Amino acid sequence: MAKNKPAGEARPVAHPEIRPGQSVELLKELHILTRDGQLNQDSRRKLKQVYHLYQFIEPLLAEVLAETGDLSLADHGAGKSYLGFILYDLFLKDKPAGTIYGIETRAELVQRSRELAERLAFPRMRFLDLSVEASTRSEALPERIDVVTALHACNTATDDAIQFAFAKQARFVVLVPCCQAEVASVMRHNKNASFGMTPLSEIWRHPIHTREFGSQLTNALRCLQLEAHGYQVTVTELVGWEHSMKNELIVARYTGQPRKNAMERIEAILAELNLTELRGRFAC
């Protein structure tokens, strides 16, 4: 005869897709599980996406923790800190060390994340209501950060996260860029002048091409900038993130060996495409 479960003990979720030990409450907060703990077709796809992103980041966290016995990760433009919560739940929850910092300028989201972390008993999660510039100087963060992430940080927020990584001497930088509007805006503003300077302006003559080429160019310049600062860069598709058109994943590992011509390439590209006013963002 089966024994009754003690009152209040959580029943295991009988879904083979969910990894053992995962927080059911967190999965409900992420809308991966329904309120009654079930998976539907949409939530199965979301869960697959979460695991796919995690598989890129987990080896980096394991490497740092194995080498130093500790780990610090800063997630910029954290929003509701879904990425930070997933990383803590799947990787740090049962380990004795390691801290995740969620950095977000919207105070209400920071407060919500603090409340959720307390409810889930995730004590080594910190949430800061700071801009990127302020976070670089804040005493609430350690002098060095091991891993910097920015998932769908809009427009120049990704570039700000890169500058934060440089300032904090990050070992790894993981970026899923989003809404790269700044470069496209400058290209659009300079379009008439560019026509007389270079036949390459035909690449972005039409508005849809301006947007698409501006997005690709932005990420190419970011990769060169990382390489100029001593990072080895890998660019791939974030396969499985079907609900987002922004499907590019940039992973950078610090080697301390800058690519010799990276900054020269940035300067040449900006000059050739009549974008020299963006030197302050990329050529630094």
Image (tube, rainbow, N blue to C red):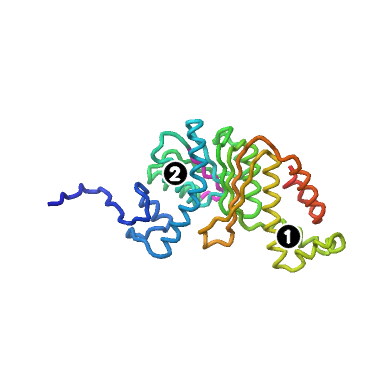
Give the residue displayed 64% in from the left and 55% down from the top: 155
Q: Give 261 or 229, whichever is nearer the viewer.
A: 261
The tag on residue 277 is none
Secondary structure of residue under mark 2: helix
Quadrant location of the C terminus in the rendered image: top right
Tell me, yes or no, whether the highlighted magenta stretch contains residue 105.
yes
Crowding near pointer 1: few (<14 within 10 Å), some, many (20+)?
some
Which tag, 2 or 1, sits closer to the chain's start? Answer: 2
Secondary structure of residue under mark 1: helix
Q: Which residue is mark 1?
A: 185
Give the magenta-colored segment's residue range: 99-107
Tell me, yes or no, whether the highlighted magenta stretch contains residue 12.
no
Give the residue displayed 42% in from the left and 61% down from the top: 43
Please provide percent x and percent y for residue 48. Answer: 45, 57
Q: Is residue 25 left or right of residue 64?
A: left
The tag on residue 88 is 2
Type of amino acid at the residue the image marks with label 2: Tyr
Crowding near pointer 2: few (<14 within 10 Å), some, many (20+)?
many
Please provide percent x and percent y for residue 80. Answer: 49, 52
Please provide percent x and percent y for residue 193. Answer: 85, 61
From the image, give the main secondary structure of the stretch colored magenta: strand
Quadrant of the rendered structure where residue 47 is?
A: bottom left
Type of amino acid at the residue the image marks with label 1: Ser
